[in-house]
Image (tube, rainbow, N blue to C red):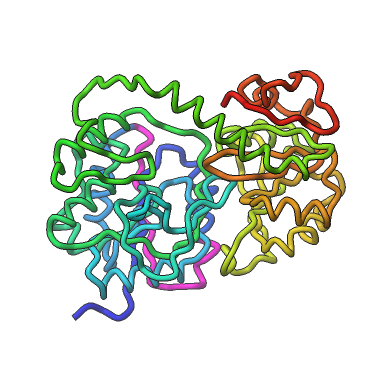
Amino acid sequence: MSKSHASISVICVYNKPFVREQCLDRSIEALSSESDDVEYIPIDNVSRAYPSAGAALNHGVSLAKMDVMVFAHQDVYLHSLKALKKAADQLQTEEFGVVGAIGPGANGRLIGRIRDRVVLAGDQADRLTEVDSLDEVLFMAPRGQLLSEPLTESLDFAWHCYAVEYGLRMQRKGLRTGVADIPLTHNSLSVNLEGLDTAHQAVARSYTELLPVRTTCGTITSKIAGKNRHDWFAPHRSRYRWLRDSIALQGTRSAADGMAAVLLDLRTHIDGAIERAPGRQLYIVNRSTGSPFVMDRKKPIELTRGTGTAVFADSDIYEIPGAVANRPPGAWTLITNLSKPDIKFLEKQMVLASSILGFHHATGFWLLLRPRLAELPESWRSRRATPLGVSLTRWPRRTQIGYCRT
């Protein structure tokens, strides 16, 4: 019979010691009082001794002594060991072969709420929920199972999709893939897509009977099994996205009086803003729904990003005006995960003039308070981010929002 309370080994393969120390190490140390049966095993790959994540993590499993192996990226900041332990307990008592923090469900929506760089992503998982696949940012499996069925060490899955492959392999054995409520911040500073196509093609070739498979990096179908496939429709998809995003942004123009408006994915553009913020420090408030993302909201979390820092908190929409008012004078504040009604509410409660209103289909609406657009990186004022018909050098008081290239 499985133990009622599982012990866990947290295993991480790293190539940047400073990143690991500032994120995963620091969070585990800060949460050490929550549990005494957590083992931490960092695997050094600075010299590239391991050719794949699977090879390094499997070595970690061979060193581990606990019941459940938790694989986490070096740039993950955990917010609750209790939540991690609860997920491990659920894994041991239900028919799941692998459980993680976030993954796409049958309808394509992301299940599992995490902070992806500076925005909240995914729907809160109130219970262990079955999904198509898991993101590699954090996932777990029983030690005994991993000893008999280790992670793939194939170079096709060197640094991508090894959790996806493992979930599909367990599905063939009658076990499910699930997501639990495991709050974390993925403090990623870059996006590595090298080898992703190869991994997707390998999944398509190896698991034809289980296709299509939704992943956090797109849906894998039988059509992508062939190599060197050229996507003739990519430019049209890009135009469709800026058209769709522009229409969405146009619907908020009643709240845009005095504000610049841009179409920008904050996840890949935020560090330029942090570098230009006073003291190179940006305050970020994620608008959350349901239960708090981080239970102790009174203790903001400060993480290093590039040459600056981001100070994170999450808040209910009704608490945001007070949270912003408590920021140091002159500080720049970013409010994310907003809806159209949220913006209208904040317009009534706060002075939003001279702020920046933004939108991206993957992250929703956001507001950046304090800075002028001219103080931000050139990419924020580029033709791709500027609504069509608006001067790139001069913004009218009321922005006429039209179609935009993104």
Is 72 left or right of 26, judged from the image as shown?
A: left
Residue 318: quadrant of the picture: bottom right
Q: Position of residue 196 (x, y in %)?
A: 32, 32
Question: Residue visible at 78% across and 18% down?
Answer: 393
Q: Nearer the viewer, residue 47 or 7?
A: 7
Residues in magenta, as a range: 29-47
Where is 90 relative to 220, above or below?
A: below
Residue 14: quadrant of the picture: top left
Where is 381 relative to 256, above or below?
A: above
Q: Position of residue 188 (x, y in %)?
A: 50, 41
Question: Residue visible at 81% across and 26% down?
Answer: 395
Does the magenta run of residues contain 40?
Answer: yes
Q: Position of residue 166 (x, y in %)?
A: 22, 50
Q: Position of residue 402 (x, y in %)?
A: 67, 28
Question: Residue visible at 58% across and 35% down?
Answer: 245
Does the magenta run of residues contain 50?
Answer: no
Question: Residue visible at 56% across and 29% down?
Answer: 242
Where is 162 relative to 405, above or below?
A: below
Please state the total of marks drawn on the protein image: 0
Quadrant (top left, top right, bottom left, bottom right) of the N terminus: bottom left
Q: Nearer the viewer, residue 245 or 326?
A: 245
Quadrant (top left, top right, bottom left, bottom right) of the C terminus: top right
